[in-house]
Image (spheres, rainbow, N blue to C red):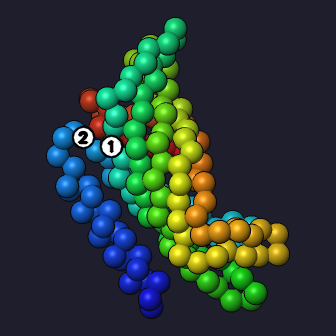
Amino acid sequence: MRKRTQFAAMLALTAAAATARADGPFTVFIAEGGVTVHGTYSLTAGVAWPSKWRHTSHSGVWTAQTEFFVSHWSAKLDGHRESFTQVGLSPILRYRFDHGRSDWFAEGGIGLSYIDGLYQRDHKRFSTRFNFHDTIGFGRSFGANREHELGL
């Protein structure tokens, strides 16, 4: 029950951070991690806000944003299920193709995260509650002003 209360509080903080942002557009996102072969699943909610940094290359446009997220994930450990809450902050670089005119983009970044428990399995072990968090993805923007996105 304590883990669910922590996760609800983190989601409320995420929503508060989203509504407190007044100096530019922000994105609210939800990501579901599915169930892996090892029985681990996750659900992530977060906010992203753009930077003013922009760089035009010979065939595309680079932009940057910062993401704050909260994840709740669950794993089978020693025959029973354990839940974890993870919070993180990551700078993300995004490349938009066709001199920035394309609806398609690629993105990636490396940030920091904190998890409320120490994850240990036979095949995987986190040595600390503080970890690096990496992101890589591809996506497409939709809408008249690219106000919607679908990413993987």
Q: Which residue is drawn at the image coordinates 20% and 55% (left, top)?
A: 20
Is there CB contact under 8 Å for labels 1 and 2? yes
Above or below, 86 against 99 in this view is below
- Expressed as whole percent of the image width and height from the top left, the position of residue 30 reads 42, 57
The N terminus - image quarter: bottom left
Q: Of all residues shown, which one is farthest toward the top?
A: 58
Residue 86, image x, y percentages:
51, 67
30 sits to left or right of 114: left
Q: Identify the amino acid type marked 1.
A: Trp
Q: Residue at 26% of width from left, 29% of height from top?
A: 144
Mark yes or no: residue 9 visible. Answer: yes
Tell me which corner region of the image, top left, top right, bottom left or bottom right, holds residue 83: bottom right
Q: x%, y% of residue 43?
A: 49, 66
Tell me the kind of residue under disc 2.
Pro
Q: Is residue 131 above or below residue 144?
A: below
* Crowd rating for badge 2 (residues with CA inside 10 Å; few <14, some 14–19, many 20+): few
The number of numbered badges drawn on the structure is: 2
Q: Which mark is residue 25?
A: 2
Residue extending farthest to the left is 22
Residue 115 percent location from the top left of the image: 55, 70
How many other residues sit within 10 Å of disc 1, few (<14), some (14-19) or many (≥20)? Answer: some
> Given the current orientation, which residue lies at the most extreme right position?
122
Q: Which dot marks residue 49?
A: 1
Q: Visible in this render: residue 98?
A: no
The residues bearing labels 1 and 2 have C-alpha atoms spaced at a distance of 7 Å
> For numbered disc 2, what is the local secondary structure?
loop
Residue drawn at (68%, 89%) of the image = 80
Q: Identify the residue at horizontal 24%, vertical 63% (top origin).
A: 16
Can you tell which quarter of the image residue 25 is in?
Answer: top left
- Give SS at disc 1: strand
